[in-house]
Amino acid sequence: MALITLRQLLDHAAENGYGVPAFNINNMEQGLGIMRAAAACDAPVILQASRGARSYAGDIMLRHMVEALAEMFPDNPVVLHQDHGNNDATCLSAIRHGFTSVMMDGSLEEDMKTPASYDYNVGITKRVTKAAHAVGASVEGELGVLGSLETGEAGEEDGSGAVGKLDQSQLLTDPDQAVDFVTETKCDALAIACGTSHGAYKFSRKPDGEILSMETIAAIHEKLPNTHLVMHGSSSVPQPLQDLINAYGGEMPQTYGVPIEEIERGIRMGVRKVNIDTDCRMAMAGQFRKIATEKPTEFDPRKFMIPAMEELEALCRDRFERFGTAGQAGTLKPISMDEMARRYASGALDPPIAGPLAA
């Protein structure tokens, strides 16, 4: 199956009331684990690469790897998404290399450390959206700075993470400002800040309303009922994976992620894309440690990778099933980027979204 755009997938998700996990990838083994889970669940897939992943694997390798995965699993529509683009060049180079969707993270300046002004965010997201839509690619914007409501600090992942203390006005997306942002930029999806953060160390306790503001999501959805919302930093950091890592030599302190039931609640309030990276890393790393400890003479990388892929596949299957993505692949009919470009040019896809895309 040909690659599809994020906009087409999220419109379908909105029409059918489900969410889509967006898994970060860097290599073949991650891709195979995720796609095997998708095939088992009949699920569409978002594979996303950060700037760090693009540097690690290379754009050509990533593009051809994802094309090969799409060929191997032809019944599962795939979005190839740039995660946390930091400027116009990063986003447009991704599109030139075959990405069908990009995130322009204008919540931070180009260094991905300094919180940006609202005007800066609107301006750069608007420019990227205009250029991407001209060729049919989708754009995810971000409003609000990802970080902890407990500490006022942001976690870092692949070079992205605000430095210094942040106040609550930065850490929680303003619903009225969100309306203006989507109207001005015409972005296809909006990542919002509600207390989640990158990495494994999100919360020091099981999150409640004080440190994970699901009410922010509800308020934004009420004002923008047709806008696709995105939860970043939404790994659940499963206790069994923490225990597995620590049982085989790891030293992860007790930590808490975003509970799956809260993500399910978010999906009922308009969240359509859920970013997951840390959980996938933990699944594979736990198996690496287990094999290395139990079989200290082993040196064949495949003997480490096969159980790691199986652990990753099990985790991804759970997310596809819990988010309602399972069973949705067969109902999607791909729309070409050329056709998407025509629809953008006609104004048919301008926000607010009037309804699902027609095949």
Image (cartoon, grey):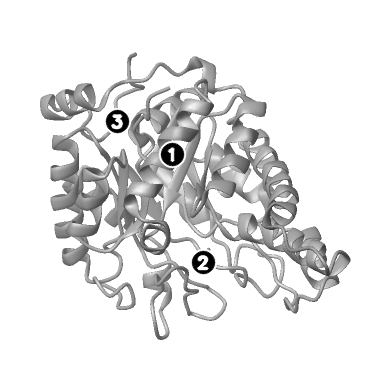
Q: Tell me the amino acid under the disc marked 2.
A: His
Residue 343 drawn at (x, y percent): 18, 24
The secondary structure type at the circle numbered 3 is loop
Question: Which amino acid lies under the numbered mark 1 shown in the image of this protein?
Answer: Val
Q: Which amino acid type is shown beneath numbered disc 3?
A: Ile
Q: Residue at x 43, y 74 (%)?
A: 168
Visible residue check, residue 141 = yes
> In this rendering, would 95 be left or right of 174?
left
Q: Describe residue 133's horizontal placement relative to residue 233 as left or right.
A: left
Callout 1 crowding tier (Cα within 10 Å): few <14, some 14–19, many ≥20: many
- For the residues bearing labels 1 and 2, Cβ distance under 8 angstroms: no
Label 2 element class: loop
In the displayed structure, does residue 264 sit left or right of residue 76? right
Q: Quadrant of residue 12?
A: top left
Q: What residue is pinned by disc 2?
A: 198
What is the C-alpha distance between the residues marked 3 and 2? 29 Å
Say above or below: 91 vs 265: below
Q: Position of residue 43 (x, y in %)?
A: 57, 28
User: Do labels 3 and 2 touch, CB within 8 Å?
Assistant: no
**Disc 1 element:** helix
First in residue order: circle 1 vs circle 2 = 1
Percent x, y for residue 75?
Answer: 52, 20
Quadrant position of the C terminus in the picture: top left
Instruction: State the image coordinates of residue 125 (x, y, percent, origin top left).
Output: 20, 54
The residues tagged by marks 1 and 3 sit, at their Cα atoms, a distance apart of 29 Å
**Dot 3 corresponds to which residue?**
353
Instruction: Quadrant for the N terminus, please.
Output: top left
Picture quarter containing residue 293? bottom right
* Residue 66 tag number: 1
Work out whether residue 126 or residue 253 is closer to the camera in this orientation and state it: 253
Label 3 crowd (10 A; few <14 / some 14-19 / many >=20): some
